[in-house]
Image: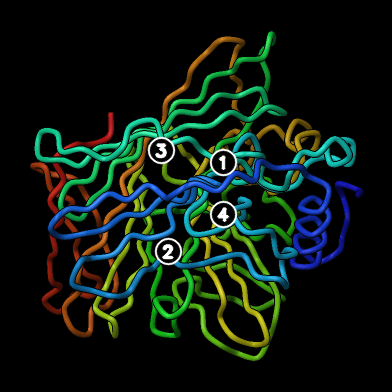
Amino acid sequence: MKFACKTPFSQRVRFLMLLVCCMSTCQVTAQEPLVLETGMARVTVASAGGGLIEFRLRDHALNPLNWRVTPDLEPPVASGKPYLQGHFLCLDRWGPPTEAEQKRGMPFHGEAPRVVWQIQDKPVQRDGLVVASMGCRLPLAGFKVQRALSLGASALLVKEHVTNVNPRGRIYNWVQHPSIAPPFLANETVVDSNAQQGFLQDNPVPTDHQKASRWPAVRINRQQVNLRRFVDDGDDGHDVSSFVFADTTTLGWVTASNPKAGLLIGYVWKTSDYPWLNIWRYRHEGKVAARGLEFGTTGYHQPFPALVREQNILGRALFEYIDTGETITKSYVVFVTKLPANFLGVARLEYQGKEIRILERGNDGPRRLSVAIKHWLN
């Protein structure tokens, strides 16, 4: 596979996912999922692949994270074998391996969503929170991963620790891949973020900020597209757009709101942990099938040699380095909340006084929402 291949992004992604899935080897032991519940919300994390596959309010049946990889993207797997679903972790890479790595079994998006995670601490009540932990090992990457989860009301704090057990340091990437799907994902679903400048993966890499797209606009097939909405239009295929945040922005956020269903899911993180936001859109048979609200350490969907050559885009690095024996910790918050009727989307999101505060878009009496959270990002 040539790194400078001009094949459309959607075709490259599908081919590489099919190829790498078939060539990789994964643990197949089935285990019970990890379930955390409060009086307001329920969270389910699969042990097979470690994906966050359910986050819903107890009195609302809709689960935004119900996406599962479909046969048009990857071949079906045996019962209990890990596969891409819900919000999964891309580690030690985002996107394809090199041809040589493929031959040695390295999967698309890395091993983290392709191995069985071990539940280490089952859910218990502690200080008004429901807490649990799980972890896995990535033998090809040489990483050990620990994940701590703390659920309070309808907000979940996820803290992950990655340790390099290799005898040498190495570069890597670490990308969160929340994937929303119908019925929560619908024509009326709106995605908002405080991201700023970016580019479409199929377009030339912008050489400076003046040549970059500005959120939520991006050029796709010579047309200006507003990424806030994604609707059925008869076309098939993928596209991915990647964005950075302003230098002064310390907290990145992305939300998806469905006013018809009266539900919003949102993510908040430190931009020092995850400086990139990547928006994946996928239609199948003309219908909206998935959206990725992906935040991480890179915004370039290429194998490592291409990342090393490019180094950075829009002033942001395309990979990180972890030394031998080093442990790096990153965290994020995900929350769900009900919406008032005819909600227009999110203009601003901030953390104040143990609350996530949300300001509605629009100048004519915008409404304010709040979500209680006991533990915050470190």
Q: Who's the residue at 50% across and 25% down the image?
A: 162
Contact, mark 1 vs mark 4 (Cβ under 8 Å): no
Q: Which mark is residue 65?
A: 2
Q: Earlier in the sequence, mark 1 or mark 3?
A: 1
256 w.r.t. 158: above or below: below
- Indicate which label's residue lies in the foreground, 1 or 3: 1
Q: Who's the residue at 66% across and 72% down the image?
A: 220
Q: Amino acid at mark 4?
A: Gly
Element under label 3? loop
Q: CA distance from mark 3 to mark 4?
A: 15 Å
Q: Earlier in the sequence, mark 4 or mark 2?
A: 2
Q: Return the residue at label 4.
A: 198
- Indicate which label's residue lies in the foreground, 2 or 1: 1
Q: Earlier in the sequence, mark 2 or mark 3?
A: 2
Q: Amino acid at mark 2?
A: Leu
Contact, mark 1 vs mark 3 (Cβ under 8 Å): no
Q: Return the residue at label 1.
A: 116
Element under label 4? strand
Q: Amino acid at mark 1?
A: Val
Q: Return the residue at label 3.
A: 271
240 w.r.t. 253: above or below: below
Number of marks: 4
Element under label 1? loop
- Find residue 84 and report its horizontal and vertical position in percent: 59, 56
Element under label 2? loop
> Is residue 277 shown to the viewer in this render?
no
Contact, mark 3 vs mark 4 (Cβ under 8 Å): no
> Is residue 124 shown to the viewer in this render?
yes
